[in-house]
Image (cartoon, helix red, strand yellow):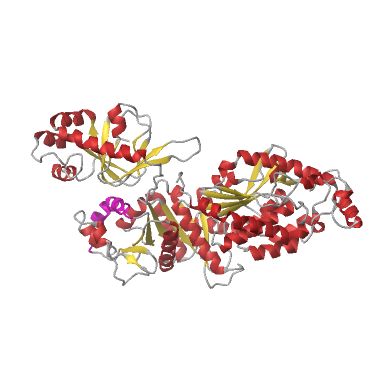
């Protein structure tokens, strides 16, 4: 936290820089007081992620950024990410409020790039102030501007981000993916995106874009904004800066690498996101320095490529280099499987790429499937899958990821399909989905890449009516055996695994033994869903991995908190459990619908006790949802009170109810998904 002196520093460079800053601009260059100040002022270097000061530290210094970037972060509640309340780049003063009031720092200051920062001792500043009153006047003006800014409606500080993509086995394909990702970032980012191409295999080779080498050769005597005037790539809507020449043997890349953090800090003033196409040559000092400053490292691999091949060796070398270069590499990495020709288990992908890694590690959680266009695949829509994957990756790295939560409700959960249909038509897709009970059935199908039409066919095939899942037994453990239900679930999902899905999918069960929620995210989907739909008293519990599991809705029918815990920035929920449900009180034969024969048959095949049990569980879920609304950005409530939980034969009517509700709520959903994310 003390920093260290940069390798190169001189009184002349201090004078030139400081006299160009507003606080010192009125001082004469011949001032004896300023000359003494220059002799004693400290210029310290801080590595990326290093603390300059911490909350609670005494405030005995003023700080001024020479190069790089510093973020001011305020700690929030336990388990929450710190909030970024200030971003300071070249020429920016910070720490001044605590210094002037004499109070301890109320926040942390952290270098978000390798940074050079002036640290001005209190007594040194007071001495200069007494001899050069103009410094105090300039500081007062600066503070008044900041006070006025703080009086405006609060808006979150969103830092620009740097993302580096490697595709060691196929760098040309990596360059293509960078172009597609840059386009996607322009769609999710209201501000500009820069593609910094450092690969030997660039798709932009031979095109007339500004060269990184020309800018760095002229550094620091260059206006970056002017140098990038010809950088726009019209077909993509983003800017391009090419690294042509940095791999040539006659270039002093070590010297160029030293100015990379300062250069990136300058770029972050103009761009919301900087995407780096790294190719495979990580040993280049310029590329290595860019990599060390990146917020995310995107590692792409074709999982069909065997590890014992020459390409696999290149992959291992890149991973080994990254782990040596970056201490928190596993906290920054996002793994991507570029799957050409169908589904490939990400389990085998990670087992090959990172042997011995715990599947519960950040590597496993931060994984994205990209399935290529035009290849043979079991997916219903290959293009939708690829574009959706690129969009998901763009949202993830830009802090705008969004999750969909589908609540349980028996046949009423068919309304989810109508909601999904409308959202698809409006162009909305999601980065993760969680479901409970029948919501898990719909959610798993959606995560497999099924559109609304295919989901409708799926549920119509496996559950055309309640008789397809209800097989009576002597009611000692449950009213129904669950054998038919098992067959229906296996018919839909077979041996598919969570790891094979297009997008992350989660579902939950309730453990009777320990009274806790169990979250499923690995293994066979059918087994997890069978546990999630086991309504107590209706279907027998499922024994799995030491748990005795019943319906997830018993403890949490709308588990939006799972999506928040998994990093989704925005969460939309669909609740299909009505607050008012008169159908559950229909306990006599006369309350049933249809002919007298149908009423009697339904009365004994679906006795009132089943509805009473289900409603008793649902009431608890409704009350719990009221306390958990903060987990959602918006909750949709389709009008399904006229349908029974066993009305599977009324599929089309229930789907239409979801469709109508989604159309009506579209303005609110759109607003919720576009809402700024204060936590990113």
Question: What residue is at 65 percent from the left and 41 percent from the top?
Answer: 517
Left or right, residue 571 beside residue 115? right
Question: Picture coordinates of residue 423 (x, y %)?
Answer: 58, 59
Q: Predominant secondary structure in magenta? A: helix
Question: Compared to 196, does 679 lie above or below?
Answer: above
The foreground one among 670 and 486 is 670
**In this orientation, which residue lies closer to the viewer: 178 or 101?**
101
Q: What residue do we see at 50% from left, 54% from top?
A: 354
In this view, the residue farthest toward the top is 102
Question: Which quadrant of the figure has residue 157?
Answer: top left
Q: Position of residue 230 (x, y in %)?
A: 28, 66
Q: Position of residue 538 (x, y in %)?
A: 80, 47
Q: From where the camera sits, is residue 536 visible?
A: no
Residue 263 on the magenta span: yes
The extreme left residue here reads 30
Q: Is the residue 400 above or below the residue 277 in the image?
A: above
What span is in magenta?
250-270
Where 373 falls versus 102 (above or below)? below
In this picture, residue 453 sits left or right of residue 392? right
Question: Measured along the vertical axis of the image, is residue 289 above or below residue 41?
Answer: below
């Amino acid at each position: 936290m003390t920093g260290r002196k940069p390798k190169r520093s001189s009184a002349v460079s201090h004078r030139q820089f400081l006299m160009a800053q507003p606080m010192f601009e009125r001082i004469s260059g011949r001032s004896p007081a300023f000359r003494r100040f220059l002799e004693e002022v400290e210029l310290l270097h801080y590595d990326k992620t290093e603390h300059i000061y911490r909350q609670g530290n005494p405030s005995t210094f003023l700080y001024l950024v020479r190069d790089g970037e510093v973020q001011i972060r305020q700690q929030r509640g336990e388990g929450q990410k710190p909030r970024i309340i200030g971003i300071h780049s070249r020429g920016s003063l910070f720490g001044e409020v605590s210094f002037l009031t004499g109070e301890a720092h109320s926040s942390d200051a952290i270098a978000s790039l390798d940074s050079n920062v002036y640290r001005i001792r209190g007594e040194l500043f007071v001495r200069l102030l007494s001899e050069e009153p103009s410094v105090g006047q300039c500081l007062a003006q600066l503070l008044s501007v900041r006070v006025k800014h703080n009086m405006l409606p609060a808006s979150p500080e969103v830092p620009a981000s740097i993302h580096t993509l490697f595709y060691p086995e196929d760098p040309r394909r990596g360059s293509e993916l960078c172009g597609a990702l840059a386009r996607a970032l322009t769609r999710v980012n209201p501000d500009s995106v820069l593609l910094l191409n450092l690969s030997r295999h660039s798709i932009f080779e031979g095109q007339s874009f500004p060269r990184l080498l020309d800018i760095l050769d002229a550094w620091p005597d260059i206006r970056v904004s002017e140098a990038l005037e010809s950088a726009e790539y019209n077909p993509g809507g983003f800017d391009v800066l090419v690294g042509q020449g940095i791999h040539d043997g006659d270039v002093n890349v070590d010297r160029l690498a030293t100015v990379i953090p300062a250069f990136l800090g300058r770029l972050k003033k103009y761009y919301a996101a900087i995407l780096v196409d790294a190719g495979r040559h990580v040993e280049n000092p310029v590329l290595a320095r860019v990599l060390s400053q990146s917020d995310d490292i995107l590692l792409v691999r074709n999982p069909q490529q065997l590890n014992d091949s020459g390409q696999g060796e290149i992959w291992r070398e890149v991973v080994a280099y990254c782990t040596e270069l970056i201490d928190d590499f596993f906290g920054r990495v996002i793994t991507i499987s570029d799957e050409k020709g169908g589904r490939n288990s990400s389990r085998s992908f990670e087992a090959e790429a990172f042997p011995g890694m715990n599947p519960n590690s950040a590597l496993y959680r931060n994984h994205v499937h990209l399935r290529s266009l035009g290849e043979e695949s079991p997916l219903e829509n290959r293009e939708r899958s690829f574009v959706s994957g690129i969009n998901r990756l763009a949202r993830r790295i830009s802090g705008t990821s969004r999750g969909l939560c589908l609540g349980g409700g028996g046949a009423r959960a068919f309304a989810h399909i109508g909601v999904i249909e409308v959202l698809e038509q409006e162009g909305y897709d999601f980065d993760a989905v969680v479901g409970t009970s029948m919501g898990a059935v719909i959610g798993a199908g959606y995560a497999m890449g099924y559109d609304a039409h295919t989901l409708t066919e799926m549920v119509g095939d496996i559950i055309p009516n309640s008789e397809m899942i209800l097989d009576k037994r002597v009611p000692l453990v449950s009213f129904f055996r669950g054998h038919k239900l098992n067959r229906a679930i296996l018919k839909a999902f077979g041996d598919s695994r969570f790891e094979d899905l297009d997008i992350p999918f989660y579902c939950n069960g309730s453990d009777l033994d320990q009274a806790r929620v169990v979250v499923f995210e690995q293994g066979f989907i059918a087994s997890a869903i069978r546990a999630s739909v086991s309504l107590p008293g209706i279907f027998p519990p499922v024994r799995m991995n030491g748990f005795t599991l019943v319906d997830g809705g018993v403890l949490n029918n709308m588990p939006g908190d799972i999506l928040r815990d998994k990093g989704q920035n925005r969460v939309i929920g669909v609740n299909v459990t009505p607050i008012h449900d008169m159908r559950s009180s229909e306990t006599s034969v006369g309350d049933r619908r249809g002919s007298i024969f149908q009423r009697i048959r339904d009365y004994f095949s679906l006795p009132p006790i089943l509805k009473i049990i289900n409603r008793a569980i649902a009431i608890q879920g409704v009350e719990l949802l009221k306390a958990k609304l903060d987990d959602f950005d918006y909750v949709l409530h389709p009008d399904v009170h006229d349908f029974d939980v066993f009305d599977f034969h009324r599929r089309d009517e229930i789907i239409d109810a979801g469709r109508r509700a989604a159309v009506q709520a579209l303005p609110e959903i759109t607003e919720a998904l576009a809402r700024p994310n204060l936590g990113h």
